[in-house]
Image: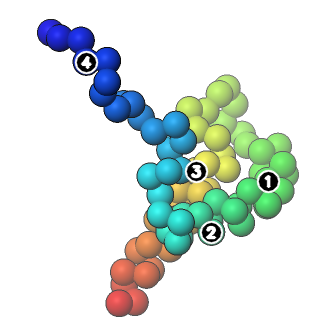
């Protein structure tokens, strides 16, 4: 195995660099960052710790729904 000191980074400094500036996920992210979900977090009956934060799960779900709807309309 050789040492390559001049290779690029394994990951970009910020993962948002990989997302196009006009991608719908940016809109979903901005909107859901402004939504207050404290009431939902207080009603969480699962107990313990979750692997994923509830807000992140909402973002994934809304983005997937938006993409599926966009593809279905075309």
Q: Residue at x 53, y 50 (%)?
A: 16
Camera-side residue of 23 and 4: 4
Q: CA distance from mark 3 to mark 2?
A: 15 Å
Q: Which residue is mark 2?
A: 27
**Residue 43 can be seen, yes or no:** no
Looking at the image, do the residues carrying marks 2 and 4 touch, with CB atoms under 8 Å apart?
Answer: no
Looking at the rendered image, the quarter that the N terminus falls into is top left
Q: Nearer the viewer, mark 1 or mark 4?
A: 4
As helix, strand or loop, the secondary structure at mark 3 comes to helix
Q: CA distance from mark 1 to mark 4?
A: 47 Å
Dot 3 surroundings within 10 Å: few (below 14), some, or many (20 or more)?
A: few
Dot 1 surroundings within 10 Å: few (below 14), some, or many (20 or more)?
A: few
- Seen in the image, is 35 located left or right of residue 49? right
Q: Residue at x 74, y 56 (%)?
A: 33
Q: Residue at x 82, y 43 (%)?
A: 42
Q: Which mark is on residue 4?
A: 4
Tell me residue 36's x, y (percent). Answer: 83, 56
The quadrant where residue 29 appears: bottom right
Q: In this picture, is 12 found above or below 32?
A: above
As helix, strand or loop, the secondary structure at mark 4 comes to loop
Q: In this picture, is 21 found above or below 47?
A: below
Q: Which residue is mark 1?
A: 37
As helix, strand or loop, the secondary structure at mark 1 comes to loop
Q: Which residue is mark 3?
A: 57
- Seen in the image, is 53 located left or right of residue 70? right
Q: Earlier in the sequence, mark 3 or mark 2?
A: 2
Dot 4 surroundings within 10 Å: few (below 14), some, or many (20 or more)?
A: few
Q: Nearer the viewer, mark 2 or mark 4?
A: 4
Camera-side residue of 64 and 3: 3
Q: CA distance from mark 2 to mark 1?
A: 18 Å
Looking at the rendered image, the quarter that the C terminus falls into is bottom left
């Amino acid at each position: 195995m050789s040492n390559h000191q001049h290779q690029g980074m394994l990951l970009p400094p910020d993962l948002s660099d990989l997302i196009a500036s006009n991608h719908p996920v940016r809109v979903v992210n901005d909107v859901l960052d402004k939504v207050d979900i404290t009431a939902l977090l207080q009603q969480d009956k699962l107990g313990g710790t979750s692997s994923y934060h509830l807000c992140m799960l909402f973002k994934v779900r809304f983005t997937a729904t938006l993409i599926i709807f966009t593809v279905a309309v075309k």
